[in-house]
Amino acid sequence: MAEVRLVHVHKVFDNGAHVLHDITMEVGDGEFVVLLGPSGCGKTTVLRLIAGLEDITTGEIFIGGRRVNDVPPKDRDIAMVFQDYALYPHMTVYENIAFGLRMRGMARAELQRRVVDTARVLDILDLLQRKPHQVSGGERQRVALARAIVREPKVFLLDEPLSNLDAKLRGHMRAELHRLYRSLGATIIYVTHDQTEAMTLGTRIVVLRDGVVQQVDTPRGVYEKPVNTFVASFIGTPPMNLFPACLVQEQGEFLLRHQDGGLALPAAKASAAHLRPWLGSTVIAGIRPEHACLHTASPAMGKGLPGTVEMVERTGAESFVAVRTGYGSMVVRVPPDLPVSLSSPVLLTFDAEHVHLFDAGSQMRIL
Ligand code: ATP
């Protein structure tokens, strides 16, 4: 296995489209790094550059310490699994898995041992004599993975490998992939726009936007300390509530005050020195749905932000309530059995510990 390093990589396509900007990132030996970002942000292009399927415009790529800019794909010791697994339809599952090894002239006994061992790991031993159209989508997925694993490459590049599967199978395959990763100890770079996959599979996540790396961090890191409003709103379902407010200090406490006056919200427990540059200016505040609390009692009863219920979404295990407030619409997570009805008055309270603050101009995290 091996580490992968991109240094100041740019990609400009022949039509002049500059799709990757100064990508510098490192994937450690045995790490599972997820490239996450919206459609068209350049995730697949990064994989194709690492695999050698596209040329780098400027910058360098290293695999296992070796500069591979001019190394052809077949010599990079990489296995790539695409979204549309592209199995050979006329070959059996066994032949599909064995194909790459056979091309390299591996001896028959060794080849057979490797195919059977890999099929056992992926639990597809019973399928070896079938053709791809005779197995299910999830099984085809496992065949595609087997075809990659059997080659024992240094690095796996997986491009949205689960996106063709239904939600239940995706959940199952996520768990399988995780198990496989732990047993192989492989270096994996995994592309997805599905944040659940990113959060559950990645040891680290690289968040991309318009070809620019926004944040490289652990799943917890990107969730708890997003570096800017883009990451804050991209990670998390439903997304973080973001709203502009003026940062003020009253009796030593930091508060967020809406332009219209009205109720001030607790802003943060932080050192005055840290927040002083923003005092008196508009900042972007953020609060996740699980860090706001909804009270159905009469607004007259306590201190909090009053609002009216706009929408109730019940998912079974939990419910989300959208509340229209003076600060805009806010989504709050509530217990599934909480009785709330549309248009009813409610009160929201926030925990200052969990309020995120961003600079209104740069959109970068202040706190
Ligand atoms: P998705 O999640 O939709 O697969 P992605 O993040 O993987 O998207 P890429 O496929 O890497 O995005 O594409 C990034 C950008 O580069 C897109 O705007 C795409 O249109 C553009 N692009 C990709 N290939 C080429 C090409 N050969 N020539 C010109 N532009 C290209």
Image: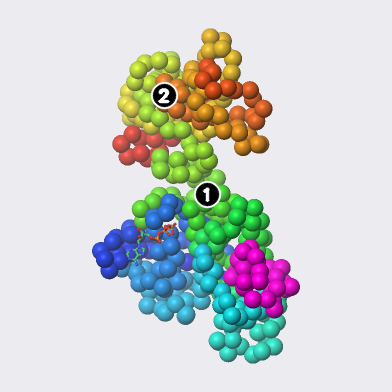
Q: Residue at x 53, y 13 (%)?
A: 299
Q: In the image, is 299 to the left or to the right of 133?
A: left
| Magenta-colored span | 119-146
- Residue 280: x and y in percent read 32, 23
Q: Residue at x 56, y 29 (%)?
A: 312
Location of ligand 1 given as a quarter of the image: bottom left
Q: Main secondary structure of the magenta part?
A: helix
Magenta span contains residue 130? yes
Q: Pick the quarter of the image with the N terminus.
A: bottom right
Q: Is residue 156 above or below residue 168?
A: below
Q: Nearer the viewer, residue 211 or 329?
A: 329
- Residue 32: x and y in percent read 55, 60
Judging by the rendered image, the residue that carries numbered circle 1 is: 195
Give the image quarter of residue 40: bottom left
Residue type, label 1? Gln
Mark 2 is surrounded, within 10 Å at the Cα level, by few (under 14), some (14 to 19) or many (20 or more) other residues, namely some
Q: CA distance from mark 1 to mark 2?
A: 27 Å
